[in-house]
Image (spheres, rainbow, N blue to C red):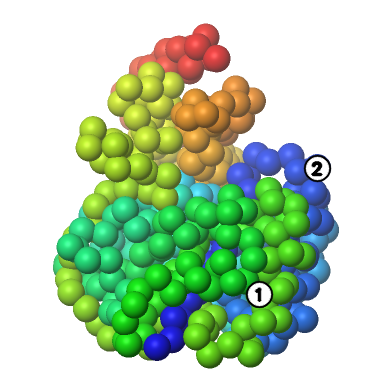
């Protein structure tokens, strides 16, 4: 019996992140992880890199990180996944925005990584899924989607087959939540403890385990995790027959298709008690959190203004088209999930990050309002009403910080 396991590392920084933080994470995490993989040709991972981070790496002069990822991908040591470029919580935005974010992510990452960027799998930001997002993922040509183990709705946790989404046919893989969390929080930090955790099933049949976590865990959040855990693991695995490292796509290819299911709406931060109270996305959209409610209203108002302006794009002059394009760019950036996460107070809270997100969204609506030509006298009035509602929501948020 062999346990096939895969690491899926998710690396991302919000588009409003400050340069010193990027610099620190590159030094502590991204470069050392790439070095460890390069020095151990048998090691491999699945990698989600949101394209907003790819752009930031380029903007701040870290081309070596981009080139290192490209080289490892060309050697088969990195298996890319797709995502949304600016890391929005996909279940909270309409399908046209989901499709746009996925396309932006694909286009930007292909610009930097070239044709080696051909993701088969999809990583929803925060592993937040709901039934509404699967059709968009299918339309964009992906084969499989990863979500948290809590999303599994089958009576057994799939480890010997790949379950299928009952409507789209997408392959469904689920992370082992407890093992992933213990790795992330430095509770599984030596090879034997790790191997014994993976071999938790007493059976003759091969099975698989998927471990997914923030890549920044290694070296940045847990300073010694690369030196004391990842590198020794990479060195030991070629000499072991009981556990084998592979990518998530290799697991999907190795194991047969299984039962169909409709997974539960959830995220990788959702707990059983959250599902019991009907709150699948507690760190981003908790009905008992007034900040979340006003943030959501604020974003929906901004979406309305930009989509309204888009209807008049063909009648805009060049200056107005420039304003609309600014509005569209600010909205793409502004709907990143971090502003809601920092408003969750569970236990994370940062007024600075909340306000940075609000600013991007407000700029989107202001530019959208200014872009509309004088073709319909009712449109400016409608925009004015929407902006007044946005400012009411904005004031509620600001005054509560």
Residue name at image x 53 percent, y 54 percent:
182
Residue that badge 1 annotates: 233
Image-based side of 183 in relation to 299, left or right = right
Choose mark 2 or mark 1, whichever is in front. 1
From the viewer's perspective, is residue 237 above or below residue 64? Answer: below
User: Marks 2 and 1, Cα distance to the nearest angstrom?
Assistant: 31 Å
**Label 1 element class:** helix
- Residue 77 at x, y = what percent? 62, 82
- Residue 242 at x, y = what percent? 50, 85
The reply to whether residue 353 is in sight is yes
Circles 2 and 1: CB atoms closer than 8 Å: no
Residue that badge 2 annotates: 20
Quadrant of residue 183 in the image?
bottom right
- Residue 102 at x, y = what percent? 45, 60
From the viewer's perspective, is residue 332 above or below residue 358? Answer: below
Instruction: Please identify the quadrant where the C terminus is shown.
Output: top right
Q: Could you say which is closer to the camera, residue 201 or residue 104?
A: 201
From the viewer's perspective, is residue 259 above or below residue 363? Answer: below
Residue closest to the far top: 399
Residue name at image x 48 percent, y 17 percent:
397
Q: How many marks?
A: 2
The reply to whether residue 370 is in sight is no
Residue name at image x 40 percent, y 88 percent:
1
Quadrant of residue 353 in the image?
top right
């Amino acid at each position: 019996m062999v346990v096939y396991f895969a690491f899926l590392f998710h690396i991302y920084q919000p588009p409003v992140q400050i340069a010193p933080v990027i610099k620190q994470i590159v030094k502590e995490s991204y470069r050392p992880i790439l070095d460890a993989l390069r020095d151990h040709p048998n090691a491999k991972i699945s990698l989600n890199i949101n394209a907003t981070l790819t752009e930031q790496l380029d903007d701040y002069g870290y081309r070596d990180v981009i080139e290192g990822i490209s080289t490892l991908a060309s050697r088969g040591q990195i298996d890319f996944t797709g995502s949304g470029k600016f890391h929005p919580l996909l279940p909270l935005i309409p399908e046209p925005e989901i499709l746009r974010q996925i396309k932006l992510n694909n286009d930007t990452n292909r610009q930097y990584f070239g044709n080696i960027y051909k993701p088969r799998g999809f990583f929803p930001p925060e592993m937040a899924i709901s039934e509404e997002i699967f059709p968009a993922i299918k339309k964009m040509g992906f084969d499989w989607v990863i979500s948290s183990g809590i999303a599994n709705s089958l009576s057994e946790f799939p480890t010997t087959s790949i379950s299928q989404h009952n409507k789209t046919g997408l392959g469904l893989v689920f992370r082992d939540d407890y093992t992933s969390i213990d790795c992330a929080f430095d509770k599984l930090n030596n090879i034997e403890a790790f191997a014994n955790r993976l071999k938790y099933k007493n059976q003759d049949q091969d099975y698989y385990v998927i471990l997914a976590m923030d890549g920044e865990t290694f070296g940045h959040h847990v300073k010694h995790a690369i030196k004391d855990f990842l590198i020794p693991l990479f060195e030991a695995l070629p000499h072991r027959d009981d556990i084998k490292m592979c990518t998530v796509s290799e697991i999907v290819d190795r194991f047969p298709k299984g039962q169909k299911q409709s997974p539960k709406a959830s995220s990788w931060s959702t707990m059983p008690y959250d599902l019991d109270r009907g709150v699948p996305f507690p760190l981003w959209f908790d009905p008992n959190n007034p900040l979340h409610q006003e943030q959501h209203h604020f974003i929906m108002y901004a979406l309305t203004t930009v989509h309204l302006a888009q209807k008049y794009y063909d009648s805009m002059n060049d200056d107005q088209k420039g304003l609309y394009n600014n509005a569209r760019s600010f909205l793409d950036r502004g709907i990143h999930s971090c502003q809601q996460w920092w408003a969750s107070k569970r236990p994370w809270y940062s007024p600075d990050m909340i306000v940075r997100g609000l600013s991007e969204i407000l700029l989107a609506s202001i530019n959208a309002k200014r872009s509309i030509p004088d073709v319909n006298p009712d449109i400016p009035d409608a925009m004015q009403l929407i902006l007044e509602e946005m400012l009411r929501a904005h004031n509620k948020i600001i005054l509560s910080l």
